[in-house]
Amino acid sequence: MSRTRIKICGLTRPEDVRAAVNAGADAVGFVFYPPSPRNLSVKRAAELAAQLPPFVSAVGLFVNPVPTFINEVLSAVPLQLLQFHGEETNAECDRYRMPWIKAARMRPGVDLLEFALSYPGASGILLDAFVDGYGGGGKTFDWSLIPAGLDRPIILSGGLAPENVQEAVRCVRPWAVDVSSGVEAAKGIKDADKIAAFVAGVRDADG
Ligand SMILES: O=C(O)c1ccccc1NCC(=O)[C@H](O)[C@H](O)COP(=O)(O)O
């Protein structure tokens, strides 16, 4: 069984990037959404991304961005993956000619199979809780809503934490897990011990 990949999202400080890398994260997420308390300036994100060693991916997170903004970010920040959390269409996500994933905001009645078919260019689908402000809400959703047979890697997100990630991985067996609030001391301020405990929980579930 392949190991579950791990993304730690919403990093804003160098020490938190170090904590995520040292704990064994496969990717770190940088938020480019001004209403978020985790929002980063392009300059700050470039400084944080410059800290990453080889084979730890930088993911840029956007909500209904204008192309000029994404191009400004990409000119300064070496992102390996784009993550879209708004009402973007497949064509709008696909225009940057680089890998991207699309967030689905989960609640009863969401047809995930149809959702995935409407984003043929997505490398994966991030399943998140339906919260105000598009994401980063620290809320779980009903994992039983996830249908079998999704034709794309699943990134499980939404309210994960050291306390529940082992159950989440064993229940869903996602390609990857993503966490923000659950490893924080405060919004945008990560807790190194919680990050380490989260990664350990994933590794325990992987066996
Ligand atoms: O993190 C944010 O502040 C955020 C703001 C707006 C859109 C998306 C946002 N985060 C997206 C992520 O990938 C989060 O890691 C994901 O929503 C899970 O967050 P949490 O439930 O806090 O673990």
Image: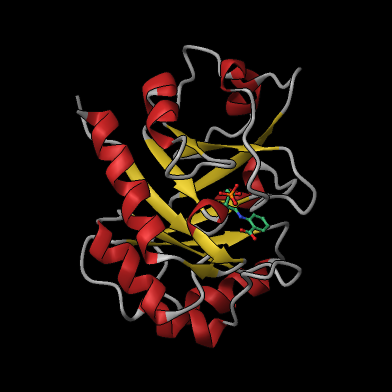
Q: How many marks?
A: 0
Residue at 34% x, 63% y is 20
Q: Quadrant of the C terminus?
A: top left
Q: Position of residue 93 (x, y in %)?
A: 60, 50
**Relative vertical location of residue 182 with respect to residue 57 in this rendering, above or below:** above
Q: Residue furthest top?
A: 148
Q: Position of residue 149 (x, y in %)?
A: 47, 13
Side of 70 relative to 206 (left or right): right
Q: Position of residue 192 (x, y in %)?
A: 37, 65
Q: Quadrant of the N terminus?
A: top left
Residue 15 falls in image quadrant? bottom left
The colour scheme used here is secondary structure
Residue at 37% x, 22% y is 170
Residue at 66% x, 73% y is 68
Residue 188 falls in image quadrant? bottom right
Residue at 49% x, 73% y is 74
Q: Residue furthest right?
A: 132
Q: Position of residue 29 (x, y in %)?
A: 47, 61
Residue 195 falls in image quadrant? bottom left
Side of 137 relative to 117 (left or right): right
**Relative vertical location of residue 82 with respect to residue 21 in this rendering, above or below:** above
**Relative vertical location of residue 3 with respect to residue 136 in this rendering, above or below:** above
Q: Looking at the image, which is closer to me, 13 or 85?
A: 13
**Relative vertical location of residue 149 with respect to residue 2 in this rendering, above or below:** above
